[in-house]
Image: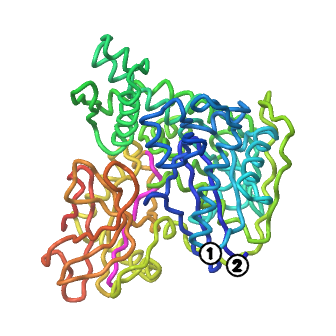
Amino acid sequence: MGGFRLSVDYGTSHTVAVLAEPGGRTRPLLFDGSPLLPSTVAAHDGHLLTGAEALRAARTTPAATEPNPKRRITDGDVLLGGRSYPVTALIAATFRTVSDEARRVAGHRPALTVTHPAGWGASRRGVLAAAVASAGYDTAAYVPEPVAAARFFTARSGVPVGAHLVVYDLGAGTCDVAVLRRTGDGFDVVGVGGLDDVGGLDLDAVVVDVLGRAVGATGEWRRLLAGDRPRDRHALWQEAREAKEALSRRASALVHVLGRDLPVSREDFEAASRPVLDRTVALTGQVIASAGLTNTDVSAVYLVGGASRVPLVATLLHRATGIAPTVLDQPELVVAEGAVLGTGPARAETPPPDENPTPDPRPAPPPKPPAPAPAPAPAPPAASLFDFTPPPGLVARSQLGAGVAVVLFLLPIAITLIPGLRTAVMNDLLRTELGLDPPGDVIAVFSPWLLCLLVQQLTPNGSGKSRVRVDDESITVVRGDKPEKYLWEHVNSFGTEKDRLVLHALSPAPGGSGFVPKKLVLGDPAWLPSGGRGFAAVVERRSGGRFRPL
């Protein structure tokens, strides 16, 4: 097998695949420049299209498209364009796309690990296994999604043996909550629950409902919702999804509908989405109780799934549990990253598929995850999400270890001695309700001796008083020239050019269709340290997201 390992998190809306190299370095596979492969499948001329091709086909032939095959996993067959297809064929088409890309990158087909909801019984797991086998994998390892997520977070910050943690997974189509106990060789799932009718798609519907109230119950609006104009209806839901994602970063968003631009405020969106999210918070409490625990027994709450970045999610969970949830910039990638961390090339276990899969009357007890086989130590997860070869002459993120020590030494001194920095930090910690802003404010410290920029994020999210530690693995920077959009860049390497600080990063492409490399020039010569002294700067959303000297 050559030591390569592949993990696949097959989701309702998107599929994520992460490849681990023999040396332990991991990276997501990219599809049309994005780590998120749409799970949509479309039938065309007797063939099944996947990913971006399927999305394009959906605009013209929506009746021949299934946007969320995972939601149909118990249906047996799916009708596409007048022809019936086994649901396993739809799922297999996506896995085949992933397998082909992995083979292209690795040079051969890597060993495979597949994740699944912890609450899935034997029937649904059997359908998934049959689809994976149909895609050409006779053997594969299977890991519950919350176990994979726990592995990822544990690799970033250790969880002591015996501790309990909650994984809250709000994806496109479902909400799954699990309570796990840390053991000597991994995690045991001690509580699990899910909602099959709550997810990011339902939050998209909330945006559409808000727009409907603004437009009014006109005949044109009713015809649009009824599907009389398929292309326009598809465009409406696409605009709604983009508005939902934008509202996670700013206070309002514009949606083009019926020939005009309508504003949607975060306040209106949160008020309308509150009943939906309240159900997920109630589920979290029920799962904790079902494990025989109380909130005080839980060490951490981890948020995964794309919809979990909605600011109200962290706020409501914090209020209900008293625990400030932890969320990353790319929560969609957590499960796949964690799955590949805990696997080795020799492990392969395949559950036997049922002969006649039927819906489970109730979820079967989750399988105990296999003990990880010995494998080379993986690279730090934060450095593996987006990684490409740095340009010559620049210091890559792998060289930041020494920078951490310098920062940990300098930062307390700077906070103590510099009044402006001390005031800014204390205001942030004590007054800002950071649960309303998942990415949070950021402290950036530059070391002239190491020629590197270490950007530290105050964590966990939630009220300022709870955010007492910094996460030195979150290396991100806010775009200063687009303060109204609060775009985040994933920094790969740093350096200086003509006395200016330069960062090479991956930036979200226009329209959210992937990531593109960018070169960012921050600051001017007056900002750079002189005389062998470092400087600190605070990035505040309240000041427009711009770096500024203190």
Q: Nearer the viewer, residue 107 or 26?
A: 107
In this picture, residue 205 sits left or right of residue 155:
left
Q: In this picture, is 272 found above or below 178?
A: above
Query: Any magenta on residue 62?
Result: no
Q: Which residue is mark 2?
A: 2
Name the side, left or right, on which 147 lies relative to 32. Answer: right
Q: Are marks 2 and 1 in contact (CB under 8 Å)?
A: yes
Q: Mark 2 or mark 1: name the one nearer the start of the chain.
A: 2
Percent across and percent down for residue 532 are 24, 88
Q: Position of residue 117 (x, y in %)?
A: 69, 44
The answer to whether 44 appears left or right of 87 in the picture is left
Magenta region, residue range: 451-462
Residue 447 spot, x, y in % from top left: 32, 81
Residue found farthest to the left: 526
Q: Nearer the viewer, residue 351 or 433?
A: 351
Q: Can residue 69 be seen in the rendering of this structure?
A: yes
Q: Which residue is mark 1?
A: 107
Mark 1, other Cα within 10 Å: few <14 / some 14–19 / many ≥20: few
Residue type, numbered disc 2: Gly
Of badges 2 and 1, the one in the foreground is 1
The numbered dot on residue 30 is none
